[in-house]
Image: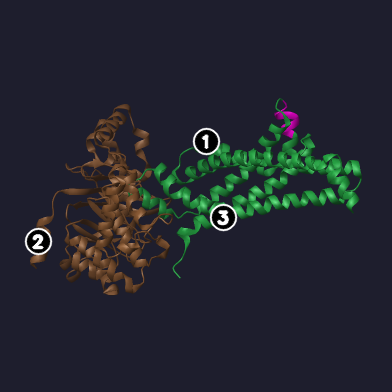
């Protein structure tokens, strides 16, 4: 047992490979989350505003196509197409970040749109009746309330995304999973590396969950009922 | 009796004018030609069976509902697009005016420019306008619109609205609810708005609730705060859309009390309600709406003691 552990982690400073791999995984995840949230918010707003106020007709159509394509095909296939056909001129790390970001954006968009649509129409009407314009109503009333509702599913999406990045080995990026594969290829002992990286993924996800709890508690003030 | 006389002398110039209002929701025709006028200082109560279009008419007054045909004027400014059928001088420019009338059936048009509601509805339904519109006619409409149109958001600042379901902003505290609009629209500084908010909260005896969120309040408290939220904008007129319908019976009183106070202070009010006692006591004029039109319009005394419309008689016999 110690022997397999030694070969998988200590020998030739292999622990530092895991760290590098984790670094890549986190870099791709965080980059993709940033792109995904940015894209998702824009798409969600276009679709929501189109539905409520009737602006951005063409934009909403384009968004529909984007959502259909990126939610309708496997992210693995998207990654291959991006790497081999569309983004051939970019370094692989960028291909990975962009692909996961654009893919995640589609899911984030639907989550945020759901959050926004959960806000009662009466809230918008009350704001408009006071003389606030559409932008002011969106910023001060709809977005804060919709964001609160969207937060838990949003973190679910982030968690799924972190785990999904484990397929970037296909396009030659050495992330946490690829590191384990490489070490197993040398030691022929899969137990320690794979259990180890599973534990690392788990820890990352637990940290994300804790973060969500923290944010939810902060936002829960306005929700507390009279006891 | 003296009190009623006082109310009448307070009534001044016209605030809201509703002209030939039609509203369709898809195929469903909710308003079928409504015209009325709200004068300064008036307390107009609108009653009628559900589905009669009374709420829709109220919501048209601040354009929460955009009328399909007809115009809304507020303090002499046009809020809706121009309805050419209300302006014979524009129609004449198109030289198709007479044709429209004859095609619609008969030429019932008098010099004041009033059509028979039925004929207008018919013309509009067949959308003859589209077939006959010409260049002169278009530019005349544009000119008229430019001369009279006014920004809707600016107008809404002068029209307070109270909803059936309160619609307090859930993500903001009571005080933030009161100050959001005045501060956001740069009518007041934050300090001024909070001072005014506190003054209003004191008036309704809820100053201790300034920093709580709406979800901790009772229905009656919510509605009273919704009313002072509208008051914080210092409106010229207040619209009430069934303000007590969603309340527990024991909370109706406190809301009506506040509304009566407002009425006594001389606020112009338009109230859609089922509270007949309130209508009788406070109203300077009562409208009875049924099937998308105003069936009867009268002072409270005449309205309740000597109703003329058959449908109104039936309605009153059921609710009183």
Give the chain letter at badge 2. B
> Pointer 2: what residue?
B6
> Pointer 1: what residue?
A58
- In the rendered image, what is the letter of the chain coloured brown? B
Q: Is residue A138 magenta?
A: no
Report the front residue among B290 and A44. A44
Spatial CA distance of label 2 from label 1 is 58 Å
Assess whether mark 3 and mark 2 are in contact (beta carbons under 8 angstroms).
no
Q: Same chain for the residues at labels 2 and 1, yes or no?
A: no
Q: Position of residue B7 (x, y in %)?
A: 12, 60
Q: Magenta stretch? A: A81-88
Spatial CA distance of label 2 from label 3 is 60 Å
Q: Position of residue B105 (x, y in %)?
A: 29, 45
Residue B250 vs A62, above or below: the answer is below
Q: Is residue A86 magenta?
A: yes
> Pointer 3: what residue?
A214
């Amino acid at each position: 047992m110690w022997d397999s552990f030694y070969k998988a982690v200590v020998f030739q400073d292999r622990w530092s490979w895991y760290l590098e791999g984790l670094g890549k995984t986190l870099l791709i995840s965080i980059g993709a989350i940033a792109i995904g949230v940015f894209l998702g918010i824009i798409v969600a707003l276009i679709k929501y505003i189109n539905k409520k106020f009737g602006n951005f007709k063409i934009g909403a159509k384009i968004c529909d196509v984007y959502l259909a394509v990126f939610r309708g095909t496997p992210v693995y296939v998207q990654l291959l197409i991006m790497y081999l056909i569309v983004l051939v001129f970019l370094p692989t790390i960028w291909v990975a970040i962009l692909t996961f970001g654009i893919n995640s954006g589609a899911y984030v968009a639907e989550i945020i749109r759901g959050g926004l649509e959960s806000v009662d129409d009466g809230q918008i009407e009350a704001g408009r009746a006071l003389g606030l314009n559409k932008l002011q109503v969106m910023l001060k009333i709809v977005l804060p309330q919709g964001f609160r509702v969207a937060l838990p599913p949003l973190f679910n999406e982030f968690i799924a995304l972190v785990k999904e990045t484990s397929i970037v080995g296909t396009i030659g990026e050495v992330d946490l999973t690829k590191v384990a594969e490489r070490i197993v290829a040398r030691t022929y002992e899969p137990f320690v590396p794979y259990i180890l990286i599973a534990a690392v993924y788990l820890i990352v996800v637990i940290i994300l969950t804790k973060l969500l709890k923290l944010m939810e508690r902060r936002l829960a003030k306005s929700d507390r009922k009279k006891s | 009796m003296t009190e009623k006389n006082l109310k009448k002398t307070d009534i001044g110039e016209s605030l809201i004018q509703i002209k030939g209002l039609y509203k369709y929701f898809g195929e469903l025709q909710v308003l079928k030609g409504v015209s009325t006028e709200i004068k300064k200082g008036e307390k107009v109560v609108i009653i009628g069976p559900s589905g009669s279009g009374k709420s829709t008419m109220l919501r048209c007054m601040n354009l929460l509902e955009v009328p399909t045909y007809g115009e809304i004027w507020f303090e002499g400014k046009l809020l809706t697009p121009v309805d050419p059928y209300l302006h014979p001088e524009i129609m004449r420019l198109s030289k198709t005016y007479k044709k429209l009338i004859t095609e619609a059936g008969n030429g019932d048009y008098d010099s004041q420019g009033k059509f028979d509601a039925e004929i207008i509805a018919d013309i509009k339904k067949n959308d003859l306008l589209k077939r006959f519109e010409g260049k002169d006619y278009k530019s005349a409409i544009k000119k008229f619109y430019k001369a009279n149109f006014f920004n809707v958001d600016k107008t809404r600042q002068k029209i307070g609205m109270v909803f059936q379901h309160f619609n307090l902003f859930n993500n903001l505290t009571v005080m933030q609810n009161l100050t959001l609009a005045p501060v956001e629209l740069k009518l007041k500084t934050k300090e001024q708005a909070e001072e005014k908010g506190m003054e209003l909260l004191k008036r309704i005896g809820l100053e201790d609730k300034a920093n709580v969120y709406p979800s901790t309040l009772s229905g009656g408290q919510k509605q009273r705060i919704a009313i002072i939220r509208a008051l914080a904008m210092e409106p010229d007129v207040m619209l009430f859309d069934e303000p007590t319908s969603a309340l527990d019976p024991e909370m109706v009183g406190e809301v009506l009390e506040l509304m009566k106070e407002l009425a006594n202070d001389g606020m112009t009010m338009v109230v859609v309600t089922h509270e007949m006692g309130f209508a009788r006591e406070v109203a300077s004029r009562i409208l009875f709406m049924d099937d998308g039109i105003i069936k009867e319009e009268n002072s409270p005394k005449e309205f309740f003691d000597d109703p003329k419309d058959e449908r109104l008689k039936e309605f009153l016999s059921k609710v009183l």
